[in-house]
Image (cartoon, helix red, strand yellow):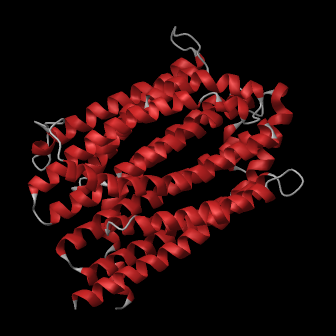
Amino acid sequence: MNLRDYTKEFKYNWQLASPVMLGMLGHTFVSFIDNIMVGQLGTAELAAVSLGNSFMFIAMSLGIGFSTAITPLIAEADAANNYLRGKSSFKHGLFLCTVLGVLLFIMILLAKPLMYLMKQPVEVVELAIPYLDLVAFSLIPLIIFQGFKQFSDGLSMTRLPMYATLLANIINVILNYVLIFGKFGFPQLGIVGAAYGTLVSRIVMVWYIWYLLKGKEKSKDYVTNIKIFVLDKLMLKKIINLGAPSAMQMFFEVAIFTAAVWLSGLLGKNPQAANQIALNLSSMTFMVAMGLSVASMIRVGNQKGLHNYTDLRRIAFSLFMLGTMLACCFAILFFAFHEELPKLYVDFDDAHNLADNTEVVNIASKLLIAAAIFQISDSIQVLVLGALRGLQDVKIPTFITFVSYWLVGFPISWFCGKESAFGSFGIWMGLLAGLTTAAILLYIRFNYLTKKLIVGSA
């Protein structure tokens, strides 16, 4: 094959992935706006949102990771024109997502006392707990939304979740502004106001995606007349077998970034606030890779349904190529503006907090250099993981992600992230090592499996 065989797929890959990217970037952009708004209140408030969200990210990783089991099943059924199997996959997936959302909410409530045992700054913990109560409840509508989103993606209708997300984001930003700062006669609630905005916007998001899917000819029969409690044990088992390892894959990755939040908290509130800034900026570029990962999962799932393994491999490699090119562009952007980007998050006109704000910006600018370097490995690992999910290969990749992040990445973050070593930058050296290891090992796995499938079908 020549280069043209891969690049000709770029246009369709982009059309499929760009709505997913925009929807995910919308989520992250709201987090970006949240952080800027909360940052105006002080570094302790910004650190509190970081600490509260660290618990949320762990729970969300399990819920979102689990829901990804729905997409390849729907994509495979759609390619094979098997409506009954598709509807069964969606119904059972939605039921399990709802149950999981409730369980994750309860888990967060039970985990709150851990904050006092983690040696985090006391003022940060006291601000974080009331914020976390409300944001935790928003997990239920968020994971239900994920069930609808992954179904919609599986039918290659990637625009509809984007529309629902954008509407929710607009509502979130407006409510945050009104409630954080007490505008238009509303009470000034500080970071609790941000939590109310998140909760309301996520409830609206679920209703709107259902409304959109109900209005489309291709999807309306799937999302109406759902006998949610008439369940098939075999289908439940199939989704759990796919979803549980996928949830653990995302958990292992998100958990190491969460560990970075906690490790930076041991260094003080300013390193923790700086970590939040670098994490928020790098998560925005990661959403582009996530969009391509979803496209990878859909297209590989389609080709698997058609048993066309040569095209499956070619299409997957075209996605890997596109993702790597974009990651290189983001790496250059981060490196070029590593001193300027963190300044968006703090108020240099606040004379009282000037020393804290200056320290936060100095630390965050160094972390963005590490973030620039790991753009490429982060993009490759998530793209290959999407392709493996499309193949419904989840168990070995789960083991790979555990080894990469927790046997390679975390020990480096732990030892190099101490104040006596490299501090905050040392924590991010561990993240870079973990992501690079995952990218290499997952690629080896995908390369082996696709060659084996091609030989087996010859």
At horizontal 59% and vertical 21% (from top left) the residue drawn is: 130
Q: Is residue 2 above or below residue 295?
A: below
> Which percent across, then down, holds residue 395?
42, 65
> Which percent across, then down, holds residue 208?
27, 33
Q: In this view, does 90 lie above or below 139?
A: below
Q: Nearer the viewer, residue 162 or 339?
A: 162
> Which percent across, then down, holds residue 311?
27, 81
At horizontal 40% and vertical 29% (from top left) the residue drawn is: 201
Say whether residue 133 is left or right of residue 199: right
Q: Which quarter of the figure is the N terminus placed in?
A: bottom left
Q: Is residue 376 visible?
A: no
Say whether residue 6 is left or right of residue 181: left
> Which percent across, then down, holds residue 35?
61, 35
Q: Which quarter of the figure is the C terminus placed in?
A: bottom left
Q: Which of 3 and 383 is in front in this view?
A: 383
Say whether residue 137 is left or right of residue 339: left
Q: Can residue 257 be seen in this view?
A: yes
Q: Nearer the viewer, residue 423 or 290?
A: 423
Q: In this view, does 286 lie above or below 198?
A: below
